Image (cartoon, rainbow, N blue to C red):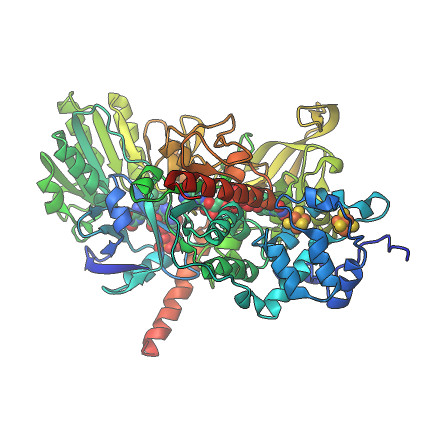
Amino acid sequence: MAINPKKTDMEKQTPEKRVKNFDEVALGYKEAEALTEAARCLQCKKPLCVDGCPVSINIPAFIKLVAEKKYNEAAKKIKETNSLPAVCGRVCPQEEQCEIKCIVGKKNEPVGIGRLERFVADAERESGNIEKNVVKLPEKKIAKVVIAGSGPAGLTCAGDLAMLGYDVTIYESLHATGGVLRYGIPQFRLPKEILDIEVDYLRKLGVKIIVNVLIGKTITIPELFKQGYAAVFVGAGAGLPSFLGVPGENLSGVYSANEYLTRINLMQAYKFPETDTPVRIGNKVAVVGAGNVAMDAARCSLRLGAKEVYIVYRRSEEEMPARKEEIENAVEEGVKLHILTAPVEVLGDEKTGRVKGMKVIKCKLGEPDASGRRRPVIIPGSEYVMELDTVVSAIGQSPNPLIPQSMPELKIGKWGNIVTDETTGETSVPGVYAGGDIATGAATVIAAMGAGKRAAKSMDAYIKAKLKIN
Amino acid sequence: MFKIIKREDVSDTVKLIEVEAPLIASSAKSGQFVVLRLKEGGERVPLTIADKDKKKGTVTIVFQVVGKSTIELASFKVGDSIKDLLGPLGKATDFAGAKNIVCVAGGVGIAEIYPEVKELHEEGKIVTTIIGARNKALLFFEEELKAVSDAMHVTTDDGSYGRKGFVSDVLKELLEKDKTIDLVVAVGPVIMMKVVSDLTKNYNVRTIVSLNPIMLDATGMCGACRVTVGGKTLFGCVDGPSFDGHQVDFGELIKRLNQFKDEEKNSAEIYKLKCRECRENGH
Ligand SMILES: Cc1cc2nc3c(=O)[nH]c(=O)nc-3n(C[C@H](O)[C@H](O)[C@H](O)COP(=O)(O)OP(=O)(O)OC[C@H]3O[C@@H](n4cnc5c(N)ncnc54)[C@H](O)[C@@H]3O)c2cc1C
Ligand SMILES: Cc1cc2nc3c(=O)[nH]c(=O)nc-3n(C[C@H](O)[C@H](O)[C@H](O)COP(=O)(O)OP(=O)(O)OC[C@H]3O[C@@H](n4cnc5c(N)ncnc54)[C@H](O)[C@@H]3O)c2cc1C
Ligand code: SF4
Ligand code: SF4
Ligand code: FES
């Protein structure tokens, strides 16, 4: 039977409709679509796709179960290695990970692994099976461990350690769990209800989650060891926003993407004044940068009523780091791309200190730089002024410095990242492990989860060696 | 949830609450603050830790009723709970090496400066305290501060109590008279901190101010709180809230504080309307 060259389409809300709401854009496969897509998988004996998945999901096995309509079994199969499938199925950069390796992709479009993963996770949730699928764990625990931060790295590490028989406590500094999944990625890409259910699953595994605790300030890691915790995992993320470094960056109306998205997502400013935290959008918004963060900020702006939204990016469309799918979505919704354009100065009103525009300059591409991407070179004399009400800086985040500052013996790398052994998550301090964006700098959800997993495994080994358990 | 175990009216517009928060109480240092969120949907409000009791496991917060969240907080009673409370945040104030210190506070800054005066006093430093307010009714904590200060001065703008005039008037006289003053700490309205900093610059006396930029997470993650100090962009919540007053760009701070003025006003108006309704409905 000839294979269908195309991935089965997934229905989306139309652009005209979706820019007026915060509901999910992509609607997920229906059963028939999932079955069609599952049939495209060749069930490889040596599945290359699995190598591309940072948490090594047994992809052919779960797809086979889908083809057999054993959705609940498929969910259990995925959860053997991935505790957040509904999240990953939505936000994983599949096209660069599992799917890029898929053999079908050599000649045709690869199997829609992410879409199938999402389908399975949604089916499990909708049939109310999550509860039933919770594994019974022994009452008696091996030892107490702490996880600092409830982003994907922390949640995964916590889940795995709970399954291995540990008494796990997560401390989260914000008032809500999820890290970037909650405060960064908007509702229309990842509904918070789904995140809630996946976090709740961890609670059912016995994980204690305590919010409003900032490790390093409320309590320090050495104090935790004194309280009898056997090991600590730091998954504090890359929360420190970078600013443009041009004059005018502190004018009112210049936000970091973190501030902008946190106001909108975590604090639900889109419901203001029903909620108490405001955000001011204005009519014309420029978002500087072209990663997922930038696309999210741009698309939120449209949904909050901005008339014109621009992405300002100094390289070309080719180099944009965001997921292709999300760039397409943004453009469909009306976001305008000002590529090969770099900010020079944010202009403001003298009296109020509010943004009124941004001077930018055109660029062309020169030789490749260290990242292998072609370096933008400014074209002298090509400056022009964009009229704006709001500027969002989405040019990157670096690792959170708070925990390293409170623990000088923790070795820090060039970018303020905690130095770890990549395969074990060990830091320079015995018993302290780290992973995710705090160790690598801003990366991906699934990479953070992979790091959480590897750390859980080595923490288990470390604790058992120390307690002389085998 | 964080239970309120004490609630007082310090003045008409300034209220005090004592809240159960053992972890925060055991690690708080002077100059640090908390962020609280009253309930689901509420905003994150930064407030200074005015006092702490390690044994009881409580922190005291003194706040001025200015907008939606502080109006609502003022309606909380003993036994009620605050949904979220995070802290201690920010760096403890660094008084390094100072021996003869003048602490200047205005408005609700009087409560915020209390833990610092107390700490300096306990360390055996010479502390002169100047407090001021628009009028007598807005003054508080005089006795408490007197007990931990070597000398105490009080001013009111209208002369209804203490000396008529501004805190800076008294400070100027002290700086003229006493050349051994080696540090001034100023906490209060931005404009007061600016005036004090401008004044002490002439006398070349190191000055620490406690800034109150708009904050969101207050953990260094968003940059909402950024301030320009010595030409550099710093984050109020993690690099501060205390900074060298001679280096702060106060003009920028004032503008940034007005960023959401219309929205804040709107929110407070709606709340007041609703609140009247809920009172009439007997809730
Ligand atoms: C807007 C946006 C969109 C993105 N889109 C995608 C996408 O589509 N696909 C993708 O794969 N990746 C995406 N990413 C990247 C991805 O979200 C991150 O790489 C990932 O979340 C990192 O996980 P983490 O667990 O390391 O850290 P985070 O998710 O950053 O979580 C860290 C958590 O630790 C908490 N914390 C920090 N310090 C402390 C402390 N001292 N004590 C206690 N708690 C602390 C923080 O509050 C936070 O909750 C996006 C990122 C952003 C910002
Ligand atoms: C580190 C820090 C410590 C603080 N400590 C105290 C304290 O101990 N006691 C206290 O009463 N207040 C303190 N503040 C100020 C307090 O956070 C604000 O008064 C509060 O957020 C106002 O919230 P609201 O919803 O009631 O008013 P809003 O509706 O938010 O604002 C009402 C009015 O207050 C102004 N305003 C808003 N935010 C601030 C701010 N951060 N500082 C000054 N004015 C503001 C607005 O411009 C507006 O005019 C502190 C602020 C910071 C950053
Ligand atoms: S978790 Fe991500 S990389 Fe792994 S199979 Fe799912 S979509 Fe692919
Ligand atoms: S590589 Fe592609 S075809 Fe082969 S098992 Fe994986 S998903 Fe199926
Ligand atoms: S309040 Fe967000 S970084 Fe300071």
x then y, percent, for residue A334: 72, 51
Q: Is residue A13 left or right of residue B100?
A: right
Q: Is residue B166 above or below residue A132?
A: above
Q: Is residue A228 left or right of residue A199?
A: left
Q: Quadrant of residue B152?
A: top left
Depth check: give the residue in front, A36 or B173: A36
One can see residue A422 in this view: yes
x then y, percent, for residue A166: 42, 51
Q: Is residue B59 left or right of residue B230?
A: left
**Where's the C terminus of chain A, which quadrant?**
top left
Q: Residue at x 28, y 63 (%)?
A: B76
Depth check: give the residue in front, A73 or A419: A73
Q: Residue at x 38, y 37 (%)?
A: B238
x then y, percent, for residue B112: 24, 43
Q: Residue at x 13, y 35 (%)?
A: B122
Q: Quadrant of residue B151?
A: top left
Depth check: give the residue in front, A21 or A424: A424
Q: Residue at x 90, y 58 (%)?
A: A1
x then y, percent, for residue B143: 10, 46
One can see residue A92 in this view: no
